[in-house]
Structures are given as structure tokens and as C-alpha cells.
Image (cartoon, grey):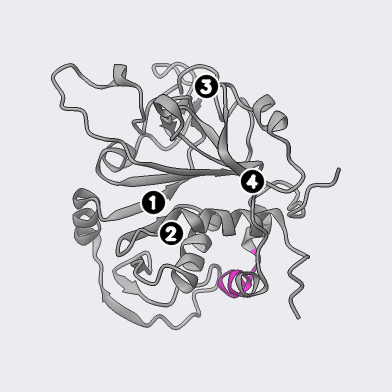
Amino acid sequence: MINANDFSLAELVIVAAAEAWRGDGEVLATGIGPLPRIAAGLAKLTFAPGLVLTDGEAYTVEEPIPLGSRDHQIKPSGWMPYSRVFDSVWSGKRHAMVTPVQVDRFGQANISALGDFKRPKVQMLGVRGFPGNSVCHKNSMFLPNHGKRTFTEAEVDVVASVGHNPARWPLSAKRKPVDLGIVVTNLCVLDFNGPNHAAQVLSLHPGVSFEEVQAETGFPLLRAKRMRVSVAPTEEQLAIIRRLDPSEIRANVIKGNPPGRKAA
């Protein structure tokens, strides 16, 4: 029997992240990493039936594929080869939740390298599809370790994903609206929809204070007008999460797999 009062921070984050896709209609939902992927499946099965999910290879599916074992019997509902993924990207019919290593006050994100780009301290993935994704469709974010190294005081070391910094648009380029969704972390949920695209905290995870979040962020934050406590998972949501992740891969994402309610 599932006890709705017994949930992990990872499960709380999944429920919060699922809200990114509320009201999106029929779009390709892409969750990068275990928690965003489970969140997309949770959204599909509870309040967003129009979401299009893939098996990660060539098909669309109506039933999200559980993490871990590939013994799951896939029941494809459509064809989604790589070319059709790009058709969805370019047309704006996609909403991804990405997992950058740095985010700045402009909502710009970095997955490429840390330090001087010519001689980086850490070389990572490169910008990959971030530039095109960020100008073509909506993107939300998940960062499992909220701190000043991830939410940087200065601009991110490499602008892999565009944000609301006009200086990063060439003078000859026509600026496109940047559609940033929510940013979910191990401490809170925020967005960049404050005045002049300022970052604002939408909800605090149970036991976390606004002052604590601000102390771990390298740029000023605002309190959203209706800032609240992040909603705890229901029994139904927990059952779905545990069905989508039977191997409990989610337990390894946030360090120490802490409980959903932070101790005083």
C-alpha cells in the first residue's frame, strides 16, 4: 500500500516537473534525464493526454516506457524517426525539459564547457542541439543541485541555449521570442517571467525558505505574487511514478535521495 505522506524529494520534483507540460496540447514532450522523463510520462497519464511521447528510437507511444529493463513490450502508436523529430523541433511543436550545468540571470544555459572556452577546465557535451532548440520551441529545465556554481553570478561560461540577453543576438538578426518554461531544482520551482524577465520563485519545496534559495543563487530572485509550497505527490501519482521507474533509478539523481519534506 502506498503512503502519500512517505515520498522522496525526487518524487516531489517529478510531480513539480510534470506541471511544465500542463496546457501544452499536442506537442512532442522530451524529458532529458531520469526525472524529467518520468515527469513527462506522469503528465501524459494524468492531465496531458495530448502529449506525444517516443520510445527514444523510431516510434511514438501512448504508454510511457518504464526506465531500466528493456523487457517492456512496446506498443507503438505512430512513426517518429529522427527526421520527424526535427520537423517537430523546427515547427515549435516540442517542449523539452533539459538538464544544463549552468544557468544565469538571463535564463541562458550551458552544457558545453566550464572555464575559458579556448582552454576549458572541464569539457562537456558541446552545445549539441541547444541553440536551435532554444529559438524554435519551449524549453524547461531541471537542475538537481541548486547552488551558485549552477545558478551563476556572471554569465554562463558558454551560452549554449539562448535566453533574454539582447547582447547575444547579432545586430543583423531578427530576434525571436524565447519561450522558457519552468526551472525545477532540489530546492524550488522558478521561472523567468518576472518584470523584465527577472527570475522569480514560484514554489518552495517543503521545509525550504526563500532566503535559503536566494543564498544559493548567484543573482537576485523575486518572490512570485502567489509563491507557495510545492505540492506533495498524491497516492495516484506515486503509484504511476513507481510503475514508470520500477528499478528506482530516480533514487540516484539527487544526492543522498533525501525525503520530500526537509527536516527543520
Q: CA distance from mark 4 to mark 1?
A: 25 Å
Dot 1 alpha-carbon crowd within 10 angstroms: few under 14, some 14 to 19, many 20 or more: many
Are the residues at dot 2 and dot 4 in contact (C-beta closer than 8 Å)? no
Task: Tell me which label, 4 or 1, sits earlier in the chain.
Answer: 1
| Residue type beneath disc 1 | Ala
In this rendering, which labeled residue sits more in front, label 1 or label 2?
2
| Residue type beneath disc 4 | Arg
Q: CA distance from mark 1 to mark 2?
A: 13 Å
Are the residues at dot 2 and dot 3 in contact (C-beta closer than 8 Å)? no
What residue is rendered at 76% in x and 81% in y?
A: 1
In this rendering, which labeled residue sits more in front, label 1 or label 3?
1
What residue is rendered at 26% in x and 40% in y?
A: 132
Q: Which residue is mark 4?
A: 228
Estimate the x, y position of residue 103 in percent, counting from the top left.
Answer: 49, 30
Can residue 37 be seen in the rendering of this structure? yes
Estimate the x, y position of residue 149 in percent, counting from the top left.
Answer: 60, 26
Q: Which residue is mark 3?
A: 121
Q: Which residues are magenta?
A: 240-248
Which labelled disc corresponds to residue 22?
2
- Secondary structure type for disc 2: loop
- Secondary structure type for disc 1: strand
What residue is rendered at 36% in x and 30% in y?
A: 163
Q: Which residue is mark 1?
A: 96
| Residue type beneath disc 2 | Arg
Task: Tell me which label, 2 or 3, sits earlier in the chain.
Answer: 2
